[in-house]
Image: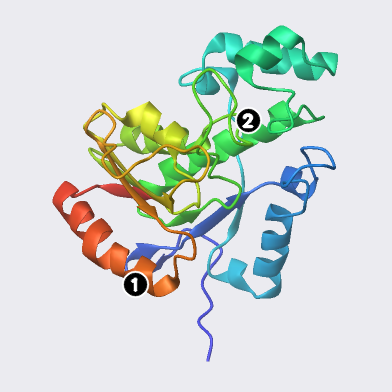
Amino acid sequence: MSDVLPNTDAEQGGALAPLIISAEIYRQTGYGSNHPLAIQRVGAVLDLCEALGWFAAAPYTESDVASLADITRFHEPDYVSALIACEDAGKVSAEHRQKYNIGTMENPLFPGLFHRASTCVGGSIQAGRLAMEGRTVYHPSGGTHHGMAGQARGFCYFNDVVFAILALLDHGAGRVLYVDLDAHHGDGVQAAFETDPRVMTISIHEQDRWPHTGLLNDRGGGSARNLPVPPGFCDDELAFIMDEAVGPLAAQFAPDAVVV
């Protein structure tokens, strides 16, 4: 027996239907041929969701694209301008490569880079706004958690997670909890909010792995918690940490919204 949910704002049991935010641009491969992300990832996720009929329960919503004003709320204007100029020129100067960490093997220049990164930010701002309407919102292209205010890092040009959190705060959340489950420490998000008492960041990541930050005793400016785990960390161990560490921390912090 199947429940068919409407592709509208109709409520289900008192809650608005969840949404999936994405864009067709992610069906295009980026990053160049010799890069770990030069594969169809988000596009494949969307195809799988459609094949499984999940869009009936969580309708597909086209992503917004962030404006320059949106992006420079967090990212430094000179960095954003350099990224645009390098893409327009089709090359990166040695000065820009050294200062902004773009045009490297890690963060290569490729056609459509700025629009792709801006769409990712726009989708996360949109997700934050919609979540504050009472929805659960999935943004599978998001998670660029290494991006710094003035520099690309770890395949991440802009930090869309920062913008999701800012959007939640803008739309009424008094406290936001961010839980990072990636194998790498969520360094960019921690750096953005480590002194902001309205935001708690919790990162569960593999110890001694790039970017080699996020030690157990690293609390940033007070709002960060880091839980480095050994290689081979398994599902049962994750469940234990969620129950015995993340859950109690979340209960004590009492967030109005959560970003994972």
Pointer 1 local density, CA inside 10 Å: few below 14, some 14–19, many at least 20: few
Occupied quadrant, residue 11: bottom left
Residue 26 horizontal/vertical position (percent) = 72, 46
Please state if 193 lies on the left or on the right of 5 as rendered. Answer: left
Q: Could you tell me which secondary element the residue under label 2 belongs to?
A: helix
Residue drawn at x 26%, y 36% is 219
Front-lying residue, 161 or 187: 187
Residue at image x 75%, y 43%?
25
Say which amino acid is labelled 2. Ser
Q: Can you tell which of label 2 and label 1 is closer to the viewer?
A: 2
What is the x, y in percent for residue 43?
73, 55
For mark 2, what is the residue?
118
Label 2 crowd bin: few (<14), some (14–19), many (20+), radius 10 Å: many
Q: Is residue 125 left or right of residue 244?
A: right
User: Whole-Å distance between the Cαs marked 2 and 1?
Assistant: 35 Å
Circle 1 SS class: loop
Instruction: Indicate how the structure is coloured in the image.
Output: rainbow
Res 248 visible = yes
| Front one among 14 and 120 | 120
Which mark is drawn over residue 13? Answer: 1
Tell me which numbered mark, 2 or 1, is placed earlier along the sequence.
1
**Amino acid type of disc 1?**
Gly
Q: Nearer the viewer, residue 245 or 54?
A: 245
Instruction: Please report the residue visible at 61 percent of the width from the left and 47 percent of the height from the top.
Output: 141
Residue 105 shows which numbered tag?
A: none
* Residue 136 versus residue 3 in the image, above or below: above
Tag count: 2
Tags 2 and 1 in contact by the CB under 8 Å rule? no
Residue at figure coordinates x 82%, y 42% from the top left = 34
